[in-house]
Structures are given as C-alpha cells and as structure tokens.
Image (cartoon, rainbow, N blue to C red):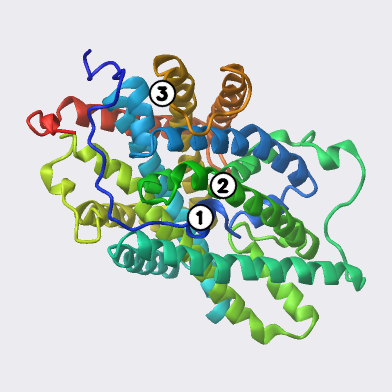
Amino acid sequence: MDQDSQPSLICSATPATPSSGQNLGIVTLTMMTAALFFTLRNMPMMAATGLQMIFFNIVTVFAFLVPIALVAAELATTWPKNGVFHWVEEAYGTQWGFTAVWLQWVQSVFGIASILAYIAASLSYAFAPQFASNRWFVFSVIILVYWVATLANLRGTRASGIISAVCLSSGVLVPSLVLIVMAIIYVITDHPVHLNLALTPDNWLPLLNPQHHLLLFLSFIFGVVGIEVSAGHAREVKNVQRNYPIAVFAAAIIGFIITLLGGLAVAIVVPATRLNMVSGTVQALQHLFTAWHLGMLLPFAAILIAFGAAGQVSTWILGPIKGIWAASRTGILPTSFQEANQHGVPRNLLLVQAVFMSTVALLILVMPSVNMAFLLLTSLAVVLYCFMYLLLFTAAIRLRYTHPDVRRPYRVPGGRNWGLWLVASTGFLTSLTCLFIGLIPPGHMREGIYAPAILGSLAVMVLCPLLLYRFRHLPSAKASI
C-alpha cells in the first residue's frame, strides 16, 4: 500500500520519537494538561457576555471540550506514539498527519503571542498600569518571557512538568480562588453588583447583537483548545491506558468550574463599560483589594498571574514541537531538525520556533492597538486550530473502520461505533462553526480585508506542510521503524 496516499493497516512508517526515559505521574500530567488551557486570560472576555457566559460555557463543554477529551483519550491510549501527528497519519497518511501537527504548532505560536501580551498587561499592574497599552513594553515582555521559557524547556519534559505544576498552582489556582472567594464576600457585604441579573431571555441567551457575542464565544472555545496536546507526552506517562484519560478529564473539570466562577466574579466586580479584555482579571482584583484597603497586595497578585500565564507558555513551547519533531524523522524536514539534546528535546526546532515567535510578536508594533492585536491573534489561532480539529475528528471515525481490530484500552462509550459518531460529529460541527465565526472581523476592522486575510493565512498554513512533504528529503524518509 502506498504510504504517501493511504494509511497503513498495521502501523505507520513514522518512527516513534524516542522516549526521554522520564515517567510522568497522574498529578503531573493533570497539571500539564490543565496548564495548556486553564488560565485567567479568558475570564474578562467571558465576563463581557454577562450571564450569557453560562450558556456559552455549557455549549463549549458539551459540544467541544467533552468531544475532544473523549476522542483524545481513545486515540492517545490506542496510539500513544506522537500525538495528533500519528493519529491523523494512521487515518490519512503522513502528509496529512504532518499538516495536522503543523497547524497545531503554528496556531500555538499565534496563541502564545496573545498569552504573552496578557502577561505583559498583568505585569504592568505591578509597576505602572499605563504600560499595559505601551507597545514597546508589551513587545519586550513577549520576547523576554518566551526566550527564558524556551531555554528552561531545553531541560526536558520533567522540567516542563515541574514548571507547569508550580506555575499552575501558584499563578492560576491561587489567584482564581482569591478572586472567587473575595467576589462572594463582595456580594454578601452589599457592595454594588455590576452583573445584570435580569431573568429575561435576551440576558441569558445571545439574542441581541449576536455577531458581537459570537466573536466573544470564540474566547470560550480558545479557552479549552489544546487539551489533546499532552498526548505528545503519552510515551512518558506511567500506565498511560489508565492515567491519561483520568488526567484529561480531571483537568477539564477543574478548568471548567474555576474558569466559569472566575468569569462571573469579574463580571460582578468590574462594570462592563470599563472592562479591559486583556487585563480584566487584574482589574477585578484591583477593585476587590481597594474595597478592603488591601491595595498593597495588587503588585504581588499581578506578578503571580503573570507567573501562571508564563507556565502555560512553557507547556505550549514543548508540546506541539514534539509532533513536528516526529514528522521531521520521516525526512520531511532537514536532518538538522531531527537532532535532540541529552534531555530528549529537539533543540534546533525549539530555537527556530523561538525565532518564529519573535517575528510574530512584531504584530504588536504594527497593529492599531494592543487590544486589536490580541483579538486578531486569538481569532487566527482559533481558525487554524479548528481546521486541525476537523482532521482530528474525522480521523477518529475513519480509524474505527480501517483499524477495527486494534485493541483500544479506552473507547468512546456508545455501542460499537454510534457513540463515536455522535461525539466526533458534534465536535466536528462545532469546529466548523467556530471556523466561520473566526471570519467575522473584530472591532473596527474592515470586512473586505479581514475575512480574505484570515482565509489567505489559513490557505498558506495548509499549503506549507503539503509542499514541504511534496519536496521532502526522500533518502531520509526511509528511516526504519
């Protein structure tokens, strides 16, 4: 069977990336998985929807997060080799496996840029809040934090896991709990509540100005994308068949509950007209601290929040690049990109990624505002990722028919195949819908320019891996399994 065009019946021709010999326990894996998507960054955009965030959260969880978690759990425990790259490769061949992981990687760069802008905005509250809109300050923070995180990840997966666990607990969980608890006390002590609590349909559902709320809905989706990225570490997980599904679902539940409560807290404390989409969480803490004359704690809280977001950046730096590394070993990329250091980290790829990230960061300097750059990067990341998810969900269904006899330690529940069809189809339709929503221009961007630019970027990002595969180094592609 021609490997270039069809999947193998037994296994792919792509060699597994070598395990670094570092075993990840269930707690570390849960923290690493949660760090991929659990952040305070999306709480302000959630708060901007008011009580509609409950509706949007329910849709996000049941139409997107649950399908991804279920499908990723089945695929990762059945083919725990190279994550998305290997899953799509098994279904459609190496070129589409490479395309899938390429899109996952490229969107991570755009997504990380928005996270880094959020870090800069948070840090500004520790020193000078007016710096949050200063382009050069934001650009400098992006470059500094990303390169430091890149150098830290050269120490390997174990170091990345420790960074994720420490940053998530101290920089995300602690500030989130402080925000939620203080917001509850804020309400109990009769402070003004800025969240509209009217029991009218248009207050709970996006019936008025749907275009604006659909754009904000993307922030809910962007808040949970990437839960499957931890599958890139599946070969380093102890008892992967048992621990991976537990870690994925535990991370999903923790992230959903705390993010929803945090979004409600921000909406209660900060008036919608004064809400900053990037630094709204720190704004909320500022209001709460001021209410109880604890303003001196704001710089520490801002630093912790930035620290937590830096942990998310660190996790994203190493996850997707491992799929690119696996692809490079088929000869798609030059041999120099196949090298790894003593910690099992693709050093050269990591450095190229850092240079690419630094180039993307230049958008901060050329866009009309930091907020506009933040929204553009988020929208572009969502569109690219949704196209990847279209490949992922269809691959899961196809593999049930092309590899029916392969033992699946975890199966999406629901009969022989109908449960997977229901789950994967729901995820597919949600991804397709979000892809079209991503074409709606945010803010004051011109429609005639924005949609073609996004579609053009998507076309280029899909063609790049296909062309790289077409002109791959054929001798290297014959590497043995």
- Residue under pointer 3: 406
Classed neighbour count for the residue bearing mark 1: other residues with Cα under 10 Å, few (<14), some (14–19), many (≥20)? many
Q: Earlier in the sequence, mark 2 or mark 1?
A: 1
Please tell me the numbered disc located at residue 246. 2
Name which residue type carries label 2: Ile
The residue at the point 19 percent across, 59 percent down is 341
Tag 1's secondary structure? helix
Q: Residues within 10 Å of mark 2 (few under 14, many from 20)?
A: some
Q: Amino acid at mark 1?
A: Ile
Find residue 357 and report its image quarter. Answer: bottom left
Quadrant (top left/top right/bottom left/bottom right) for the C terminus: top left
Q: Is residue 469 left or right of residue 418?
A: left
- How far separated are the C-alphas under marks 1 and 3? 25 Å
Marks 2 and 1 close (CB-CB < 8 Å): yes
Which image quarter: residue 424? Answer: top right
**What amino acid type is highlighted by mark number 3?**
Val
Secondary structure beneath disc 3? loop
Horizontal and vertical percent position of residue 199:
92, 43
Position of residue 31 in the picture relative to residue 79 (left or right): right
Q: Looking at the image, is mark 2 or mark 3 nearer the viewer?
A: 3
Q: Nearer the viewer, residue 429 or 22?
A: 22
**Compared with residue 15, is residue 353 higher up or lower down, i.e. above or below?**
below
Q: Residue 162: where, in percent of width, then height?
A: 43, 66
Residue 381: percent from left, percent from top: 46, 42
What secondary structure is marked by label 2?
A: helix
Task: Kindly identify which residue carries mark 1.
Answer: 26
